[in-house]
Image (spheres, rainbow, N blue to C red):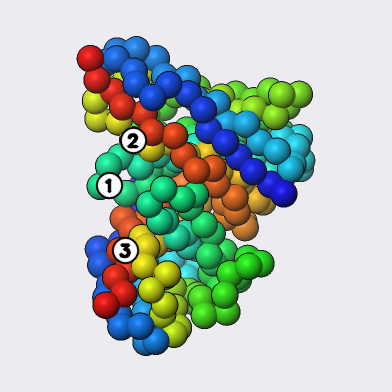
Amino acid sequence: QVTLKESGPVLVKPTETLTLTCTVSGFSLSNARMGVSWIRQPPGKALEWLAHIFSNDEKSYNTSLKSRLAISKDTSKSQVVLTMTSMDPVDTATYYCARIKGINYYYGMDVWGQGTTVTVSS
Amino acid sequence: SYVLTQSPSVSVAPGKTAKITCGGNNIGSKRVHWYQLKPGLAPVLVIYFDSDRPSGIPERFSGSNSGDTATLTISRVEAGDEADYYCQMWDSSSDHVVFGGGTKLTVL
């Protein structure tokens, strides 16, 4: 059974750096043509894609947030880590990780984590 | 950057058919996926590659994509289908994932 689970702080202060971890099971981060994406949803708003990383270490970032984001993976630990710098209250959201099937999202994001809620407040 | 447009809300009576649309310039040439979001639960992929259903998704869910509109159709709607639905595609020109603004399906 494929599962993904997000973990990280519930509360961060403005200007701090957020570090989120996605721990996967049921598949390997080295599986060809698979990857992990990070997506967020602010309260009452739409989904927003943040970044992804594929098995070949190919990475891509949301252009509007690129300067603040970094994504990496540790295949041996089955973890994908996303860091976001200079957190602001507008970054308050539920953050999800999801498995990507196929290059260029050919088969979409077939399994998602339940999400972790992050609040940015002093 | 590419934009996907969804109506904010759709309402339908139980047992009827709901159509949720996703508009975009020549979207028929793209691969579109659809996700169901319910509060407190992990999002679920309900349609991939325009019209394919993942295992475990009822046959009541179907999709189509042509011209400037992709459509998610839910037949014989049930109360449990009440959720937010998002379309999504990969924009190869910008190396970006694009989501629509989401449609809230209300079952009357």
Q: Is residue A13 above or below residue B17?
A: above
Q: Position of residue B80 (x, y in %)?
A: 42, 69
Residue located 37% across and 78% down the image:
B19
Identity, as a three-letter code, of the amino acid under mark 2? Ala
Are the residues flagged by discs 2 and 1 in contact, CB closer than 8 Å?
yes
Q: Position of residue B76 (x, y in %)?
A: 44, 85
Residue located 46% across and 50% down the image:
B41
Task: Give the side of residue A117 with respect to residue A38, left or right.
Answer: left
Task: Give the side of residue A73 with respect to residue A95, left or right.
Answer: right
Identity, as a three-letter code, of the amino acid under mark 1? Lys
Task: Give the side of residue A75 with respect to residue B85, left or right.
Answer: right
The numbered disc on residue A93 is 2
The residue wearing badge 1 is A45
Q: Quadrant of the C terminus of chain B?
A: bottom left
Q: Are marks 3 and 1 on the same chain?
A: no
Q: Position of residue B25 (x, y in %)?
A: 37, 64
